[in-house]
Image (cartoon, rainbow, N blue to C red):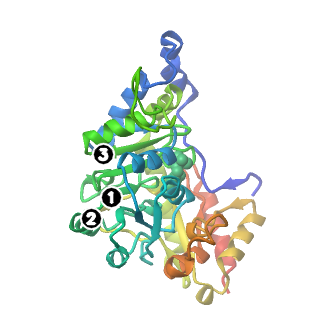
Amino acid sequence: MDEKILVTRSSMPSFEEYTAEIRDLWESRWLTNMGAKHNQFRAELSAYLGVENTDLFTNGHMAIELSLQAMGLKGEVITTPFTFISTTHAIVRNGLQPVFCDIDPKDYTMDVSQIEELITPKTCAILPVHVYGNVCQVEEIERIASQYGLKVLYDAAHAFGVRYKGRGVASFGDASCFSFHATKVFHSVEGGAVCFKDREFGQAVYSLKDFGIQSEAEIDGVGANAKMNEFCAAMGLCNLRHMEEVLALRKRVVQEYRRLLADIDGLQLNVIQKDVEPNYAYFPIVVDEEKFGADRDEICEKLRQNNIFARKYFYPLTNAVSCYKDRFDAGLTPRAAYVSRRVMTLPLYADLDLEIVREICSLILECKK
Ligand SMILES: *Cc1c(COP(=O)(O)O)cnc(C)c1O
């Protein structure tokens, strides 16, 4: 392969579409601090995602971090180690204690049958992740949360546009956070959002993203600066217009991977979940080295030699990274550890050529012994 094939490549509107969108800003000179683009983007997102309220942030991480803060939590948060480091950092940076729940080996989301045994008098919330866009067991999580009086905040960074039983995935739980980072299915260069039901939570999080400012003389929260600027909101508005076409193009790539890699002994493909309209965000494969005859690292290396850069998402687990490994025990989440050592995500983006998908699959199959 002459050109480098990375795991993802940002979808972009045409240059003309973006410049037309930002033209107003040269007249208004209102570049950030909840301007017209910000407010329009926020309203369009609520409609697209099928939720009551949305607020916008400079990135997905700050959406999670400030949402936890706005919930006014203290104590322990039950979460998953099979995620991007942001999820765990957001808990720790709030002075909260993450308690790691193991994952379901089929869809890699939190194993809900293990949540209740992790609940203690200090538990205040559950922070599950719709990892790879796979929807968590939202009904069971809701039942547990209401029985024990816990808040539920979903990390929905992977699940933009996913629907479950006809409902937007962010309509479950107290709140759900999205990331609009350039590498995600949908992006605003950098950006993030929280969708929520409770108005008071909304006011708190809105103020926290702007230093805790209520009015000129009133600062009532220890806030941060996490406002989305107008140029990012404009990129989001443009990209939102093309979601349908992006999803159709991604679907075509996923179908080609599935056609070529289905029923290969030792390769586990991502599940097709019942009642879920997926967003084709990632294409993870889990390699069982005993059945396949080669392990995940060998396949990654083989692809790399051919200029194809698959990624080991999520390896290591967040409870095993260097800053946390003395504090947490990844041995307590053995199934997550098993998947983490064997998983890789293959290149997937809207304009990925099917010829390259076929090449990637044949390189993978060449590793099989
Ligand atoms: C990308 C991501 C985040 C953080 O989002 P940013 O916009 O990069 O700050 C959080 N959680 C998960 C699971 C992610 O993939």
Q: In this view, which residue lies farthest toward the top? A: 27
The reply to whether the C-beta atoms of the residues labelled 1 and 2 are less than 8 Å apart is yes
Q: Amino acid at mark 2?
A: Ala
Residue matched to label 2: 145
Question: If the image is split into quadrants, where does the C terminus sit?
Answer: bottom right
Question: Mark 3 or 2, which is nearer the eye?
Answer: 2
Quadrant of the snapshot with the N terminus: bottom right
Q: Residue at x 27, y 64 (%)?
A: 145
Give above or below for 199 relative to 279: above
Q: Earlier in the sequence, mark 3 or mark 2?
A: 2
Residue at 32% from the left image edge and 39% from the top image edge: 202
Q: Which residue is mark 1?
A: 152
Label 3: which residue?
196
Q: Which percent across, then down, holds residue 131?
A: 45, 63
Q: Relative to the observer, which residue lies in front, 258 or 287?
A: 287
Establish whether ligand 1 lies closer than 8 Å to the Cβ of label 2.
no
